[in-house]
Every structure is written in C-alpha cells, then in structure tokens.
Image (spheres, grey):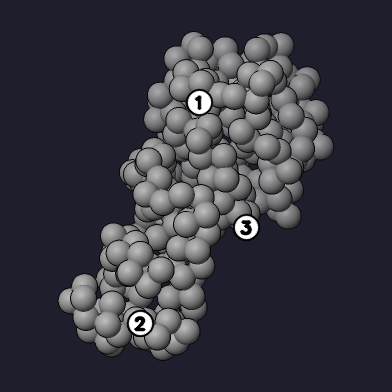
Amino acid sequence: MSELIQRFKSEYLRTKKALGQHFLTNQHFIEEIACAADLSADSPAVEIGPGCGVLTAALAAYTQRLTAIELDDNAAAFLEANKAEFFPQLRLIHADVLTVDMATLYAEPAGLITDTDKVSIIGNLPYNLSVKIVEHCTASIGSIRKMVFMFQKEVAALIASAPCSKDYSSLSVFCSYHYEIKKIRDISGGNFWPNASVYSTVLEFIPKPPALTQDEEKDFFALVYKAFRQKRKTLRNNLKDYQALPAVLAKYGKSESVRAEELSLEDFIGIWRALS
C-alpha cells in the first residue's frame, strides 16, 4: 500500500462509500494507467476524482500541467496538505466535475484551444456517475486529446461492445460515434483499498472526427435512443413515427424484423440520413 494511502488511512480511517471511493493500491496498474495517458512535460492533463492522489503522483511525474478535480472535502484537504511533497505543480479544483466546463480549463484568454493544448482526461470514475461523466466530457470533445477512464466492468462492456452482443446499447453507439475505444485491462477488486466487490475495466478513448454537424447529431442520437427504447422489440416497432422506415430498411438490405442491437454505427447513420 502506497505512502499516500497509508497517510490518508491514518488521518481519516475510511473512505466514503456514498462517493464510491476505492483507491487503487497496485503500483503496476497505477503506472500502466499513467503511461496510457501518454503525457509529456507540456501536456495538459486533468484527473477526475483523484482521491488520496496515488494516480495523481504518477501523472505528475510525466507532466507539469496537471489539474485535479475533487468533490470530497476530506480528499481535497488531503491533496492540498500533501501537494508540496508529492505533486507541487498540481492545480486543484474542489468541485463537482459535472459543474466544470472542461473546454475552458486550458483555453487561451480568447476562449480558444490549440491542438497542442488539447487535454488528456484520466480518472478512476465513481461507478454511479461514470456514464454522466463521459457524456459531460464529450460535450467538450473538441478540446480533448484522449481519455483514460476506469469503470465498473459491466459499464465498460456497455460502452465498448459491438453489434449483436448482449451488452450493445445506445451508449455503445454514442461512444463508438465519438471515439476509438481500446481496452487497457481488467482489474480485480482486491487491488483497491477498501477492496471492491466487482471487477473494474480501464478503457482508452481517442476522439474521432465528427460524421455529422452538431445539429444533426442531436437528431441522430434522438433516433438512436428511440431505437433502443425497448431493446427486444424490432426497429420498426420502436420507430413507429417514421413511416418511411420499411422502405429505408429494404434499401439497406435489412429485414423488417431487425432490432437495434443488430445495427452498426454506419447502419444507424445511413438509416438516419435516409429518414431525414
């Protein structure tokens, strides 16, 4: 167990279960996550939910431009108290990440961000908020170079699954539209303090060029969410409002009994374009 965790444990005795606090203790995995962020000394980086700072210290060894966003009062105070010794260049923001405009963290005074200032976002995300955090960060995708996040294994499966798999969902389509996604590793619950009761999975996200305009994306994802509304129903049943759907499905060689879980991102984009 790292010195930072030992200090935190001696000071606060326990983590806050309501915030989903589980601190990674395996130094090999901590370094692997830090390496996956692929940072240089000038790379702007943001860590979400640093807790007692074990990953923060590893990231600070790579970049001098590290910001940490921490909601918990105890963790924020602990990071501030240990900052000079472990991560002196750290900028700490004591706030809920869902209230932070990620696009402006490293923007120039004019509100612009250059390619060299695109940010890498890293974090062991609280399981109950992980999807909301991904969606929140994606709202600033033009400012993001990459993201490396740890999720509950089941949530990671929803994010990274392919068509025709049991975990394929509207979230899968949303994430595959915006990112190239790579699995880094699974991590068992015994590698955390306190021990977690589930497996975790680390995923890497690399932003993709948008296929649609922002206005088009809004309409496109509205269709995708409707398509998965009742997953076991056919696409035609879930999209009853689209009278042209049977003809469009025939155009793309799809049966009228096809379900949303059988369609790829490219299928969805093609069908949406034809219906629009």
**Gap between marks 3 and 2, in whole Å?**
39 Å
Residue nearer the viewer, 253 or 158: 253
The earlier-in-sequence mark between 1 and 2 is 1
Q: Residue at x 77, y 22 (%)?
A: 80
**Gap between marks 1 and 2, in whole Å?**
42 Å
Residue nearer the viewer, 169 or 4: 169
Q: Residues within 10 Å of mark 2 (few under 14, many from 20)?
A: few
Say whether marks 1 and 3 touch (CB < 8 Å).
no
Q: Quadrant of residue 56?
A: top right
Which residue is disc 3 drawn over?
A: 128
Q: Residue at x 61, y 33 (%)?
A: 103
Q: Which amino acid is tagged 1?
A: Lys
Q: Nearer the viewer, mark 1 or mark 2?
A: 2
Q: Secondary structure at mark 1?
A: loop
- Residue 161 on image: x %, y %: 34, 60
- Residue 170 on image: x %, y %: 44, 66
Q: Residues within 10 Å of mark 1 (few under 14, many from 20)?
A: many
Q: Nearer the viewer, mark 1 or mark 3?
A: 1
The earlier-in-sequence mark between 1 and 3 is 1
Which residue is disc 1 drawn over?
A: 118
Q: Residue at x 52, y 54 (%)?
A: 215
**Gap between marks 1 and 3, in whole Å?**
27 Å
Q: Which amino acid is tagged 2?
A: Ala
- Residue 204 on image: x %, y %: 40, 40
- Residue 95 on image: x %, y %: 76, 38
Residue 244 badge? 2
- What quarter of the picture does the C terminus occupy? bottom left
Q: Is residue 145 visible?
A: yes
Q: Which amino acid is tagged 3?
A: Asn
Residue nearer the viewer, 135 or 37: 135
Say whether marks 1 and 2 touch (CB < 8 Å).
no
**Depicted 254 relative to depicted 74: above or below:** below
